[in-house]
Amino acid sequence: MCLKQFAASRLALAGLPLSFLLLLAIAPLCRLLAEGGMQFHLDLLSDPYLRGRLWWSLGQAAATCLACVLVGVPLAWLLARYRFYGRAVVLRLLMLPFVMPTLVAAMGVLALFGPHGLFGVNLQDTPWLLLYGNLFFNLPLVVRAACDGFAQVPASRLAAARTLGASPWRAFWRVEWPAALPWLLSSLCLVFLYCFSGFGLALILGGQRYATLEVEIYSLVAYELNLADAGALALLVLLVCGAAAAAYAWLARRLATAAKAEPLPLRPASNPLERLALTLAMAVLLLFGGLPLLAVCWRGLGAASSWLALWDEDVRLALWNSARFTALTVLLAGGLGLLHAFASGRSLAMRAAMFLPFIISPVCAAFGLLLLYPQWSAASGLLLGAYALLAYPFVAKAVLAALDGQPAHWAAAARSLGASPWRTFLRVQWPLLQPALRRGLAFAAATAVGEFAVTLFLSRPEWLTLTTLIYQRLGRPGQANADAAMQLSCLLMLLALLAFWIIETAGGAGAKEGDRADAAQSE
């Protein structure tokens, strides 16, 4: 009887998130496939322009992966092997680009290398602008993953290789590299997925000459109303993203079976060459991960137009909409994420369904919703539902990881002492879940603040947000509009940093202790 009740409660919990996925992900995806599947044929790619967009989309994603390997692996090795004051802070700050809205990153890149850029080099209408923006977002991800991979190297195995006469270079290739490779490959799958299906950076930094397939889909729908070709291209994007996601799932599954034993202890930089290498590593991280954000602040604070002049009706409306959409999205994502996590248990199907919104790009998701529910395109509920669809997997993933990490005997001990299931949950499980829930909600809030593609497809003038207002100001001529776009980007960055601050407060004490330990060991 207890097993039947448990199964029934698990099924009841799964009902709402599964229904949500069916209505806002699976059904729109099927509608999109029907729109593009009937029209998809090889003749579509015989068009030199569309074929060029496909090859550029694949090429810039592959080039970003290669650049992340060449730059990120040495940085990760240094972070994994040496200790220095502030190392824990550096590792946590590697998450910062991930929670930054794409428009903020795009504005930072333009402030550095666009017209009138701080470096005096105009890279607009060149492929390098988009590639640099891709590195801003994805290099920290590769560095963090590879650093965790290098930390898995067993100390005894590396010591045995050195004892048998292997040089440091040979020991790296035969012992360290195989241990870090699964972590690196799984992160590169995500990098390829983010770059190939990215929209905001490609729209702002790529321009018409270096538009990706995602930008082309938006142009076909918004400007030409060519739904057939847009659906066919969206189907092509889904096929490529699905293949990349399948590769990521396979590698993540292989990674989950890896055992961690005898991690190598960190050592201080003992000679000038090692200290120089660490200094150069921090400089590279600053170049690709920090300068765009600092440039946004510099250009925004130093803009010729005053901040008071920026405070007009459109800005007030955009701030209000961004704040309320984010708050409502956090509430929806929190409820759906908790239900999905609790309903998942050991179910492989439920755990796989959690990653469905990650596979579908925001452009494809918004396009599918527009095709399936045209009568609701003017309803704010559809926009909020799309926001929640993209945000709630962060909550579900974080909470499920926390549930997996809870010792089963704690809840069993509480039940054996007479606690009811509800009291056991409130007094034992819930306090342990709160840090993970806060982190998931923070990522969900950051996703909602910076969401751009869905807003362009489904938004109305009265639903103006900061992201769409920045895009509007960029499309208008004049230095005043460019200054206003930089100032609005500062506001958008502040909203995203507020979500990041929530993440920091959840683990701030541990990070401070890590810094103190690094400093004490260095002395």
Image: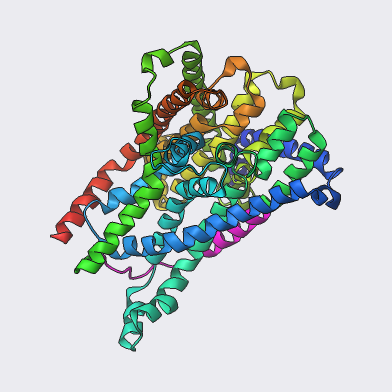
List the single residue furthest toward the bottom. Answer: 164
Percent from the top left, x then y, of residue 515? 22, 51
Q: Nearer the viewer, residue 133 or 409?
A: 133
Percent from the top left, x then y, of residue 251? 56, 62
Q: Which colour assignment does the render follow?
A: rainbow
What residue is shown at x 68% (from left), y 54% (from top)?
55
Where residue 231 sits, quadrant-wise, is top right
Q: Is residue 386 rendered magenta in the image?
A: no
Q: Which residues are magenta?
A: 243-267
Position of the C terminus, as image quadrant, is bottom left
What residue is shown at x 54% (from left), y 36% (from top)?
392
What residue is shown at x 85% (from left), y 50% (from top)?
43
Q: Is residue 264 rendered magenta in the image?
A: yes
List the single residue furthest toward the left. Answer: 523
Q: Nearer the viewer, residue 334 or 241?
A: 241
Percent from the top left, x then y, of residue 119? 39, 43
Percent from the top left, x then y, of residue 303? 38, 25
Q: Confirm whether residue 469 shows in the render.
A: yes
